[in-house]
Amino acid sequence: MNSLRNLTDNQRRVLQALSEATGPLGAYALLERLDFSGLTQVYRALDRLIALGLVQRLESLNAYVPSSEHDASHPTAFAICDQCGISTTWSTVRWRIASNA
């Protein structure tokens, strides 16, 4: 993917941390994991990753998850476990397949 080649080191680190996480991460959790000097670095990286369609913000949790290729082209809903925090995505395509099964 061409957009991945143009990422800064900080953007790559944020994307990798989100990809390796078992659930959504907030900016403070990313700050702690990545040992950046401040939240500004985290938010700049997140803003760019969102603009590129590589990350999505879960507003209800004020947290972030990596996007899949499918998420960028279809509306997506998130299911988030209240107990463990693990999230999964449901695109309209997957929803149609599941409801027709």
Image (cartoon, rainbow, N blue to C red):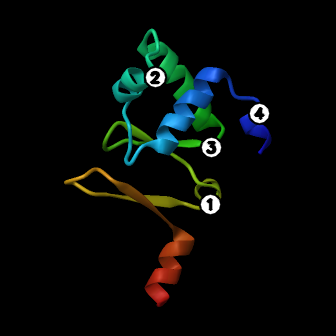
Can you identify the residue that label 3 sits on? Answer: 53
For the residues labelled 3 and 1, say whether their Cβ atoms are less than 8 Å apart. Answer: no
Can you identify the residue that label 4 sits on? Answer: 5
Give me the disc on residue 70.
1
**Residue 51 appears left or right of 94:** right
Seen from the viewer's position, the closer of residues 29 and 43 is 29
Q: Residue at x 42, y 16 (%)?
A: 39
Amino acid type of the residue tagged 4 in the rendering: Arg
Can you identify the residue that label 2 sits on? Answer: 34
* Residue sitting farthest toward the left: 83
Amino acid type of the residue tagged 2 in the rendering: Leu
Give me the disc on residue 83.
none
**Residue 75 in picture, x, y percent from top left:** 54, 60
- N-terminal-most mark, 4 or 1: 4
Q: Secondary structure at mark 3?
A: loop
Mark 4 vs mark 2, CA separation in Å: 20 Å
Q: Quadrant of residue 89?
A: bottom left
Amino acid type of the residue tagged 3 in the rendering: Gly
Q: Secondary structure at mark 1?
A: helix
